[in-house]
Amino acid sequence: MVFNLTKRHLILSIVILTISTRLCAQDWNGLRFLGHQTGKTTFNSTEIKDVFKAKYTFWQNKLPVIICLPQSQSEEAKEICEKIYGKSVDEVKKFWLAQVFQGRSRSPQFFNTPEEMASFIAKTPGAIGVVRVNSNMQLSQAITLQVN
Amino acid sequence: MASTTDIIKIRKTQWLAATLVFIHSISGMQAQERNTQLRVYGHLQYNLENVDQISNSEELHSYFSFGEQDFFVTSNITDRLSFLGESVIRYDNNTATKFAPSIERAQLKFDYSGNHSLIVGKMHTPVNYWNDVYHHGRLFFPTIDRPTSFSYFIPLHSLGLRLQGQNLGHWNWGYDVCASNGIASTDIYDDASSKALMAAIHCKPIEGLRAGVSYFNDYMPTNITGAHVGHSSVNKEYAGAINFELMCASLAYFGKRLEILYEGGYNITQTDSLGSAENQSHFGVIGWKIKEKYVPYALVDFMDISDRELHSVPIDVLKIGLGFRFDFNYQTSLKLQVERYELSQIHLDHIHNQNRFDFKVQLAYGF
């Protein structure tokens, strides 16, 4: 009986440890990345920044890269721009304005709320976006990406 | 045999599935509706000059000017096909309304593989950083005016085909290869059977830095400038054939604080009359960003066109200036610039000199 309780506790501990590790790996610098059919579900920090800086036109699965960002007036815009681009919100907006003006990139999609962004990503193959970890929303595990 | 209850359940399931498919398709259509965008760019300017540019007499001129209004449209037609159009309306004294429209860019881009694309249509010839990046958007210009060479020997536009690659490899290499109607062509016809050819390569080894070189060649059976060249200072007294070569080098760095842009051009024109003429231009601007929005800068713009030149006109220009740029936000910027402008030109067998000071203020916007 004692042995069975110990074994049950051990299994439960392993499960809890695995879940908490996975949650920590999904959160990068206070941000969580969402993606749908991006060809891969795990990125390193350099790769994820390259994606958001318009380095890639297509994923490896041939789907177009569709960048999703918060609207400049949203609460998380400033934090996301600083952590991913190292720039202010205005500088990021001008970066994308210039990219599209040069004909080198397609315009990102901008969203007022994380829920809107998640909903768009869930139904758009190739879309990738970013939200703050403390966003009060239930995120589908199917679209959450892992960044190391 | 299925019972009535089973049939009702099946029908309900089928109805629900059909509804879900319909809602999904509408959502997809709404997502596609986001893909066509129209933007407008423009500028307004104030100028103060101490020399009359026509009579070359010392007179103070103070005036406002209405800049180009740029209508910019993009559309994602499919996942791999997109359209870009840029139409400009500018002042033109030769029209009844005093304004004339112009299609500056109209191109279809096909992303055929990864970061490689095929572009067809009218485009800005990617001979240097400025023409490839800034186009007609004064909002993006680091200074008030373009380099002087743009008015004399830079082939601004090309109508044809372009192979483009970008962000390739560790140093983010890019390339452009163009075959297009020549300098003497119009938007609907080119008298020359040979096409203008251009090849350019650049790299972006660190964030904010881009370095590149290009080569452009065009054989013009007659010395005229059509719709593409952008420069009007053509030698109308020479109508013979010209072989036109241009080599450009660009270095651009726009960092957190430091901003540097250098554009160099080396142009060789070859005629049977006078042989080779070698022309060169050097444009440099250096700025320092203060608190993100404020950028004081200094510029030098030098151009030397040979006395043997027959395509353009023999002229030497030196412009040095100091400026200040204030970016209200990403959509509006104000630039103030004071310049010393010196020009020396051979005209009707005598040397025509013009030295003047200019003060300019430009408000550029985009939305």
Image (cartoon, coloured by chain):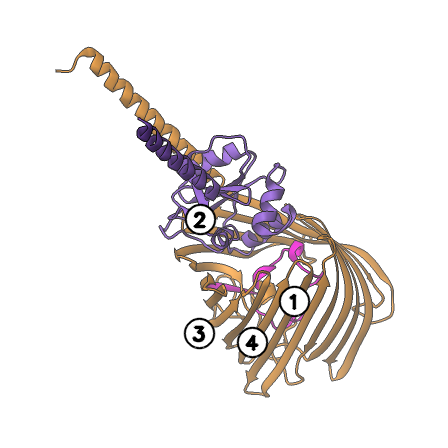
Chain colours: A purple, B orange
**Residue B219 numbered tag:** none
Q: Earlier in the sequence, mark 1 or mark 4?
A: 4
Residue B26, above or below A48: above
Rendering quarter of residue B350: bottom right
- Which of pointers 4 and 3 lies earlier in the amino acid sequence? 3
Give the residue at mark 2. Answer: A65
Q: Which residues are magenta?
A: B132-161
Q: Nearer the viewer, mark 2 or mark 3?
A: 2
Residue bearing mark 1: B261
Give the number of the disc on residue B246.
Answer: 4
Extreme residue toward the left, this view: B1
Q: Residue at x 19, y 11 (%)?
A: B4
Q: Is label 1 in a helix, a strand or a loop?
A: strand
Q: Is residue A16 visible?
A: yes
Secondary structure beneath disc 3?
loop
Q: Position of residue B305 (x, y in %)?
A: 66, 79
Separation of disc 1 and disc 3 at Cα? Answer: 34 Å
- The kind of secondary structure element at disc 2 is loop
Question: Foreground residue, B64 or A45?
Answer: A45
Q: Nearer the viewer, mark 1 or mark 4?
A: 1
Q: Residues within 10 Å of mark 4 (few under 14, many from 20)?
A: many
